[in-house]
Image (spheres, rainbow, N blue to C red):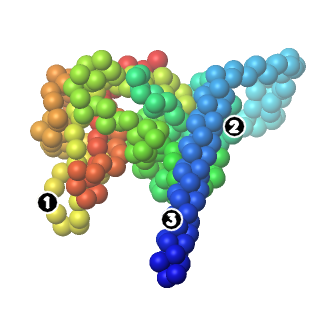
Amino acid sequence: MNSYRNMKIIRGILLAVTIACLVLLGQAYYSSFRQRQQTKALKEMREMIEPEPLEIAREPAVLENSSVPREASEPAEELPTKPEDPPPPLLEKYAALYEENHDLAGWLSIEGMVIDYPVMQCEDDEYYLHHDFYGNDSKYGCLYVRGVADVDTPGTNFIIYGHNMKDGSMFGDLDLYRRESFYREHPTISFDTLYEERTYEIIAVFRSQVYHSGEDAFRYYQFYEAQTQEEFAYFYENIKALALYDTGVTAEFGDTFLTLSTCAYHVEDGRFVVVAKAVSAI
């Protein structure tokens, strides 16, 4: 009798565990499906070109400080200062996306990979670790740059972060670059800002980690600007020394780098890193 009861308890436990596993699998599948659908919709929106608004012809207004002759008795007024140059025009293909979310900073894509996503930026550096493009809670998050990064008029380096997802999304397949053969077939990265299209050539692929305070170590994630040749050389020589293979690509003081960073599991707080050099902008 006791044996029968024990079997019923064991079966009940196994059934509960099975149901829990199925629920978790279902939730994971749904999250993955929802993320893929959102990415598909964002890609479609990227290619939506909105028509330019019609310009209505108006008679020019006569301003008080215009070149119209004044009466001799009227005192001359000081001319206004020259306005600052307007920002460059937004690329048409990103206009609709930018209207949806002004945190949009650009778009990253790599041929041969799933990586084909918007890149976000806001005051809270951790926000897009846990939120999707529309601000909903998401374990996938978004690709993002920190607030200190200037992607429009970049200095020496800016870093794009993303989750290493098990289903291969976000930066889940970035570590395909562990294989030199894959690199040889896909040596460039495309990153558009809101204002121009850019191409970057991969210069180094390496493993690293987030180091504890006080440790004497090369921290690639703290490097944004080289004010001197020595600061540039420190970054450049370290990424070359850590590189898993020699790409043959070189750089010199004044070049701009793009760094892609995601989690890795070779050590605690490990990171997998790809650094590329700007070679063109359209």
Of mark 2 and mark 3, the one earlier in the sequence is 3
Task: Tell me the residue at 18%/67% (across/down).
Answer: 214
Task: Verify CB contact (< 8 Å) between mark 2 and mark 1.
Answer: no
Of mark 3 and mark 1, the one earlier in the sequence is 3
- Above or below residue 87? Residue 172 is below
Q: Nearer the viewer, residue 98 or 227?
A: 98
- In the rendered image, residue 158, in percent from the top left (x then y), is placed at 37, 41
Which is in the foreground here, disc 2 or disc 3? 3
**Of helix, strand and loop, which one carries label 2?**
helix
- In the rendered image, residue 275, in percent from the top left (x then y), is placed at 28, 35
Task: Tell me the residue at 27%/24% (across/down).
Answer: 183
Q: To which quarter of the image does residue 24 belong?
A: bottom right
What amino acid type should be assigned to the residue bearing mark 1? Asp
Of mark 2 and mark 1, the one earlier in the sequence is 2
- In the rendered image, residue 190, in percent from the top left (x then y), is placed at 42, 25
Circle 2 is placed at which residue position? Answer: 99
Give the Cα separation between the discs numbered 3 and 1.
Answer: 50 Å
Give the Cα separation between the discs numbered 2 and 1.
Answer: 45 Å
**Of helix, strand and loop, which one carries label 3?**
helix
What amino acid type should be assigned to the residue bearing mark 2? Glu
Give the Cα separation between the discs numbered 2 and 3.
Answer: 50 Å
Task: Tell me the residue at 25%/19% (across/down).
Answer: 184
Which is in the foreground here, disc 3 or disc 1? 3
Circle 3 is placed at which residue position? Answer: 14
